[in-house]
Amino acid sequence: MRVSRDKIDLARASRCMTISGLAEAYGVSRARMNTILNQHEVTPVCAGRIARALGVDVTEIIED
């Protein structure tokens, strides 16, 4: 599953959330979160956890 870094950044911006805040909500370190976001291809579970940490539906962060 491909996640859109731009869409994730927009969701973070609307919630005034840093990468560190997202990492904390997700349950990983900031460095690991950057790795996850830079690889684009993630498992459906990972995409779901990112969406939950952002408080959005998973369809809002996947690439079209």
Image (tube, grey):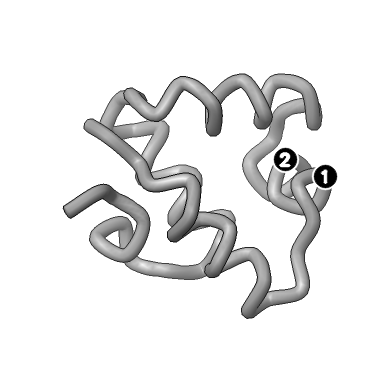
Task: Name the residue tied to disc 2.
Answer: 23
From this viewpoint, which residue is outermost toward the bottom? 14
Residue at 82% across / 44% down in the picture?
Answer: 20
- Please determine whether, in this image, residue 40 is positioned above or below residue 3: above
What amino acid is found at the position of numbered circle 2 in the picture? Ala
- Residue 41: image quadrant is top left
Q: Say which quadrant the N terminus sits in.
A: top left
Residue at 76% across / 73% down in the picture?
Answer: 16
Residue at 31% across / 57% down in the picture?
Answer: 58
What amino acid is found at the position of numbered circle 1 in the picture? Ser
Marks 1 and 2: in contact by CB < 8 Å? Answer: yes
Residue 31 locus on image (x, y percent) = 78, 22
Residue at 54% across / 33% down in the picture?
Answer: 37
Q: Secondary structure at mark 1?
A: helix
- Residue 48: image quadrant is top left
Q: Secondary structure at mark 2?
A: helix
Q: Is residue 8 left or right of residue 18?
A: left
Q: Say which quadrant the C terminus sits in.
A: bottom left
Task: Name the residue tied to disc 1.
Answer: 20
Q: Is residue 16 left or right of residue 55?
A: right
Residue 32 locus on image (x, y percent) = 69, 21
For disc 2, the neighbor class at 10 Å (few under 14, some 14 to 19, many from 20) is: some
Q: Is residue 38 left or right of residue 44?
A: right
Q: Is residue 29 left or right of residue 5?
A: right
From this viewpoint, which residue is outermost toward the front? 6
